Amino acid sequence: MSSKKLIGVDLGGTTIKFAILTENGEVQQKWAFRTNILDDGQHIVPSIVESINHHIDLYKMSRDQFVGIGIGTPGTVNLHKGTVTGAFNLNWKTSQPIIEQLETGTGLKAAVDNDANVAALGERWKGAGNNGNEVVFVTLGTGVGGGVISNGQLVHGINGAGGEIGHMIVQPGGYLCTCGNHGCLEQYAAATGVVHLATDAAEQYAGDSKLKAMIDDGQEITSKIVFDLAEKEDDFLANEVVDKVAHYLGLACANISNILNPEFVVIGGGVSAAGKFLLDRVNTSFQEYAFATVRDSTSLKLAELGNDAGVIGAASLAQRFE
Amino acid sequence: MSSKKLIGVDLGGTTIKFAILTENGEVQQKWAFRTNILDDGQHIVPSIVESINHHIDLYKMSRDQFVGIGIGTPGTVNLHKGTVTGAFNLNWKTSQPIIEQLETGTGLKAAVDNDANVAALGERWKGAGNNGNEVVFVTLGTGVGGGVISNGQLVHGINGAGGEIGHMIVQPGGYLCTCGNHGCLEQYAAATGVVHLATDAAEQYAGDSKLKAMIDDGQEITSKIVFDLAEKEDDFLANEVVDKVAHYLGLACANISNILNPEFVVIGGGVSAAGKFLLDRVNTSFQEYAFATVRDSTSLKLAELGNDAGVIGAASLAQRFE
């Protein structure tokens, strides 16, 4: 078979993940190493270049067997220049010419996009998105990220802020967000948001609840604890919190869908580990707020690729070089 | 000059508007007549065919001088089949093969989309959208409609409900909408929504206000009266109502923009006749709710084409036949 390969790179503040894929998106090799953010992050791209070159040699492959490299990165990506700015968790203080560095260093063509967009592309291509042309991806982690695919293309918007779903306002005047606004979805559906809601709820509740007892006792609460208490111990307060999270997430998914009518809204990230228990409640809220035509045609789904969404989606960026 | 012409048709429940445009979007001829919705609307498409044929003869033109016809229509459009369903204000009770009828009747190629999408295309091409690739159009009339253009293409979504901006939920549990949901933007920013807000506000207000006096006196209130009293007479209650409308509209525009980061959100329709007075207040609310990057790159603008947006945008549908 003369089919060529794609290389996908998922650059994060903690680890850098790599994969070699067939043109059909089948992962053939995976590896990863810890991100070295020392010295203003200047070792990052050279280490990626070196690792790609090393693995091409290791697998006894040649450059003409590859279509190219795709990479997902934190920060704001300038698609035209192939540069990245504002990637604070990489310690990058200035604009990084990431494409130029990758192409010069590896001798392969390279393409870049931001990490949430790349994860959206991954879930769309090989995950819950069923390779459809109308897919929205929402990822619930330490923050809430997102990617929007419409007419088969990522929506970047005029300044790259397309897909900033975590900063949709779901509660005007609500919790203060790190972005400076009040009431962003991120403050109600990311891991810290769930804990914030739990702490506030505990303060106003006098009844019987293990969650309340833990909080009052000063124990450290995580979103996982809240979901587990709700699902497995039917804790009243924990269920109240899950209902609130589901309300805000369902409202956001409905409003996204009332604007875009995607085929799927795919929910991923750490908080979504609560799985069907969370999805069912989000769906109840979604059904309440979605326009009738949207309710009948847009579905909420759990993400399917887990941590592989990034490398797979990144690799798909290289398809443009086919 | 051998430049060809486009024909645009804006089919509405009251009138049918026509225009002949150059390929550059310059309107050269316009005409209109009242919509005859009798007999299940069966006269509508034949009357359009006849009028187009008549005007081609009238202007002593030949069919090969035209690229084709574009038409905007109420209802749900099936783009692949070229059919229209659910256009209740046209009395159409069954699916209408509008493209087939137009093409057979005129001998010209024809394309169709819904009226809000077509108006969005018009404002994007020759109006406030500055021919950009990232433009959202919101029209405030008896209802609130919308059209979304991203990556240069209309967003239809999986079932044609893309752009249903009027049914974004801006107040969960709020006013009951004709769609069956509660708290849709339409109930706060369309003409009837403004009046609803005014009536409710008057009930809860005991101070001095001409608006309250009119409502208590049983006089008929319109959105224009509310805006005029706020702007020209600095009526306290009317200003409260305008602030509420602006809050909801700014919130919706911000959430749309946090998802799509368009270059422009263009606000048109009858309610937007309040112009800069309304826009300034909407902008204040938009600035409060927009994500920082969005605030810096997305602008709200008033529509510029008025009633011509429909025929111009419809004509642009025919550009695909060039």
Image (tube, coloured by chain):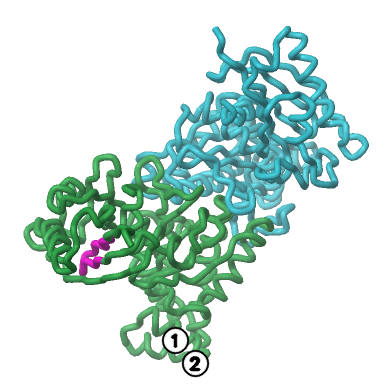
Chain colours: A green, B cyan
Is residue A87 visible in the rendered image? The answer is: yes
The secondary structure making up most of the magenta span is: strand
Query: What span is colored magenta in the figure?
Result: A8-18
Please identify the quadrant where the N terminus of chain A is shown: bottom left
Position of residue A191 relative to residue A251, above or below, is below
Q: Position of residue A107 (x, y in %)?
A: 16, 50
Q: Position of residue A313 (x, y in %)?
A: 36, 60
* Front residue (pair B221, A186): A186
Q: Residue A233: give its label.
A: 2
Q: Position of residue A145 (x, y in %)?
A: 38, 61
The residue at the point 42 percent across, 78 percent down is A273
Q: For the residue labelled by badge 1, is the local secondary structure a helix, a strand or a loop?
A: helix
- Residues marked 1 and 2, same chain: yes
Mark 2: few/some/many CA within 10 Å (<14, 14-19, 20+): few
Q: Which residue is mark 1?
A: A228
Extreme residue toward the right, this view = B39
Q: What amino acid is at disc 2? A: Glu
Label 1–label 2 contact, CB within 8 A: yes
The residue at the point 42 percent across, 53 percent down is A163
The residue at the point 43 percent across, 74 percent down is A272
Disc 1 and disc 2: Cα gap in Å? 7 Å
Q: In which quadrant of the rendered view does residue B105 lie?
A: top right
Mark 1: few/some/many CA within 10 Å (<14, 14-19, 20+): some
Q: Residue A241: give its label.
A: none
Magenta span includes B45: no
